[in-house]
Amino acid sequence: MSAIAGIHNFTGEPVSPEAGSGLMDGLSHYKADRTGTWTGGSTFFGCRIQWVTPESEREELPRASVSRGLAITADAILDNRDELLEQFAIEPAKRASVPDSELILLAYEKWGDDSPAWLAGDFAYMIWDAQRQRLFGARDHSGKRTLYYHWNGEQFAFSTLIRPLLALPGVEKRLNEEWLAEYLAITGMIDTADSSLTVYRGIGQIPPAHALVCAGGRITLTEYVRLEAGEALKLGSDAEYEEAFREMVGAAVRSRLRSRRLVGAQLSGGLDSGTVASFAALGLREDGRTLETFSFVPVEDFADWTPRHLMANEKAFMQATASLYPNMQTHFLDFAGSNPLTVIDFWLELMEMPYKFFENSYWMKGLFEEAGNREIGVLYNGARGNYTISWGPALDYYSLILRRLQLIRFIRELGAYSRNMGVSRSRVLSVVGARAFPALQSLSRSAAAAKPAVEFPLWIHPEFAARTGAFERIAAHGFAATGNSTLAAADAIEARAKHFACNSLWNSSGTSFTKLSLRYGVHSCDPTNDLRVIRFCLSLPLDQFVRDGAGRSLVRRSTRGILADEVRLNQRTRGIQAADWLHRTLPVWRECAAEMEAMCASPIMREYVNTDALRRGLERFREAPEEKDAFDPELRLLMRSLIVYRFLQKNF
């Protein structure tokens, strides 16, 4: 885990010492166990490395080999080391001393531009190939590590952070209106549809799952991997699928346990984090080690206003998970005194751009800060589990088998689901029927009476949208251009396929995890996002994911005896994090509303943002909102806009 930077002058001129030191100075406010630089004529590479894995303590970065004509600087933790060491026939006695950067170089020598596809883990790196006179770099498949660059046709400069690039001579700090237009046009949690953009003109980034080549006076970005369903895995029984699941997920968790410091996990009451934490506790138990779990809970005086099927405080489920593992040490944290307003400036400084996750911002910061204070080196999460290990939307699957007229299976599943969920068959049938046969939906009394989905207000100023072609641009990437802007899909099955085909979906979380790791020295890792786990899950028959009236069936069945039954079998309640964000903010709402008034009057905001929508929202919520309004779209619009307003004020 590192912060890296570099410059190459394609004119052949040496890189000035001032330019190299200037880049490294821009990374110096983050902690590092070792700092290294390398200069080779017209190339400068730098690295500030944080020791996470045992092999990282012995890793010299940057590293160069004159005989091979290669130099590398890397921010990388590879999770398929064993496979790569076998592939390169490295003697067992020498394997522990081989750093990840050497494995990356060996992969480049063997597979060339296709080499990133052979790597599993979190990485961003740059290689100078002297023989071919070119730079080659790559970013991991979901963008868990960032890599920004500036290119003026003669000089290529790159960095883990944006700020050092803005300090280079000749680089102007200018707003990238294309980035901002996409950011405002997409009302979902995604930043932009085009993940090569940044908020600053002249600064690009390598998108997730892409490799970059800079040579011959131009830059080429190439997608090196696309995750999609391949050949179906056919096993003989449910028990075999469950055993394969345990082997695959267990291996993904174990491959990330090699921390030279303590190991932690973000633990909620759900299937994904509970499964990951349980497998991690099992792996650590073999070595007599402890897993430290970190869980967010609401403040004590919060009264849960959420409906019965939602739960704001999942502490009972977290305790049930921990009760199975004596080596699991729990930490329940409420971060009293913190709220989304108190951390806006922190996040803007850290992210170097606006962000949308304000509801979770205060506890995310708090969790990493606490983990860092407790000397955690690796912090597990299960962020991508909804699309991998715990995927299985029952109602969408039922609509599929109904369309296929698999009536016996459908009737059996309908009855089981009705019993499990405690709802009538007729109600389930009306919902499934509407999904299976949308053309008949208008004939359904229940569908006609149903309330329309609440849509996020139009955020972008219409004239700004038209000038930049924002809606056409996001539509070209598969995003719905109106309402709740997400990937357009007919059902959850199509949505899952598009999820893995769209590399911009995880760019924002990758940015936050990279920069949190640098700030607090804690590496965030997600075994549910492991390439091998993703490919395994995509290869499974759909009926493994929905079975006997239970969605997410495979993970429930496979974790019997591993995950607490209270969590494993729960289908009726779902945790909702940060339901208390507004409760925390209400004591300072008057000051917040005053800043929102100034925001609505700001000339720069009026140019980019639909201030008519902001004023309507402010009119509703000028006086203190009710706590149950926490997820009201107009209130969320105001809070997100406040973040954009502060960013623009501070930087432009």
Image (spheres, rainbow, N blue to C red):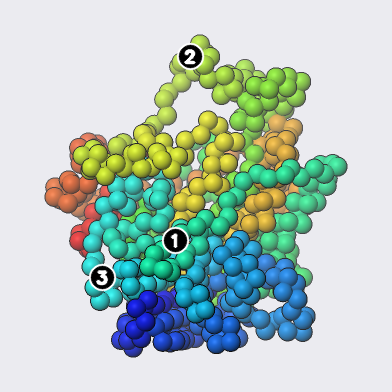
Viewer-side residue, 424 vs 33: 33
Kindly indicate the quadrant of the structure image that contains residue 569. Answer: top right
Left or right side of 204 for 489: right
Q: Secondary structure at mark 2?
A: helix
Q: Amino acid at mark 1?
A: Thr
Picture residue at 49% right of the left edge, 68% below the top: 137
Q: Amino acid at mark 3?
A: Val
Considering every residue shown, the one lying at the far right of the view is 236
The reply to whether residue 293 is visible in this rendering is no
Q: What residue sits right under mark 2 in the picture?
A: 442
Q: What residue sits right under mark 1 in the picture?
A: 220
Q: Secondary structure at mark 1?
A: strand
Quarter that holds the C terminus:
bottom left
Picture residue at 72% right of the left edge, 74% below the top: 88
Crowding around mark 2 (Cα neighbors within 10 Å: few <14, some 14 to 19, many 20+) is few
Crowding around mark 3 (Cα neighbors within 10 Å: few <14, some 14 to 19, many 20+) is some
Picture residue at 25% right of the left edge, 76% below the top: 169
Q: Amino acid at mark 2?
A: Ser
